[in-house]
Amino acid sequence: MNEQQFEQLQVDVHDARRPLNRITMQAELIKMALNGDVPVEKAMIALDKIITECKSCSESLSQIVARNRPDSQDNPE
């Protein structure tokens, strides 16, 4: 892996972590709802956001794989 590929990998990992951080925050909100600290409706909204962020993370990971596939035109090896 050359320097340019490593830099791209760092960007890709950062982009994949972003939705994971949002998922964590929404899960904390659900925990609070289960403890009775926030309305159940907020937990339902948080669950929808978690589902959306999981899909976003999955797409980011798919893009990483596609970019690093040996036959990919984006992979300058």
Image (tube, rainbow, N blue to C red):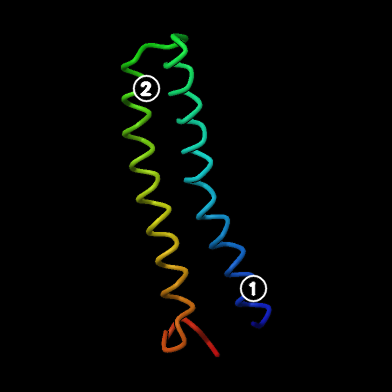
**Kind of residue indicated by mark 2:** Ala
Q: Residue 62 carries which label?
A: none
Circles 1 and 2 in contact, beta carbons < 8 Å: no
Residue 75 spot, x, y in % from top left: 49, 83
Q: Mark 1 points at which residue?
A: 6
From the image, which quarter does the N terminus lie in?
bottom right
Near mark 1 (Cα within 10 A), the count class, few <14, some 14-19 or many ≥20, is few
Q: Is mark 1 on a helix, strand or loop?
A: helix
In the picture provided, is 43 more to the left or to the right than 31? left
Task: Classify 33 as above or below 68.
Answer: above
Residue 52 against residue 68 in the figure, above or below: above
Q: Residue furthest front?
A: 34
Residue 59 higher or lower than 1, as above or below: above
Residue 71's quadrant in the figure? bottom left
Q: Residue at x 50, y 45 (%)?
A: 20
Q: Which of marks 1 and 2 is nearer the N terminus?
A: 1
- Residue extending furthest top? 36
Position of residue 41 in the picture relative to residue 12 (left or right): left
Q: Which residue is rendered at x = 39% and y = 44% of the image?
A: 53
Mark 2: give few (<14), some (14-19) or many (20+) Cα within 10 Å: many
Q: Where is residue 15 in the image (x, y as percent from the top left)?
A: 52, 55
Q: Nearer the viewer, mark 1 or mark 2?
A: 2
- The residue labelled by disc 2 is 43
* Alpha carbon distance from label 1 to label 2: 38 Å
- The picture places residue 45, in percent across and down from the top left corner, at 33, 26
Q: What residue sits 47% from the left and 46% below the top?
A: 19
Q: Count the numbered circles shown.
A: 2
SS assignment at label 2: helix
Q: Which one is nearer the viewer's eye here, 30 or 4?
A: 30
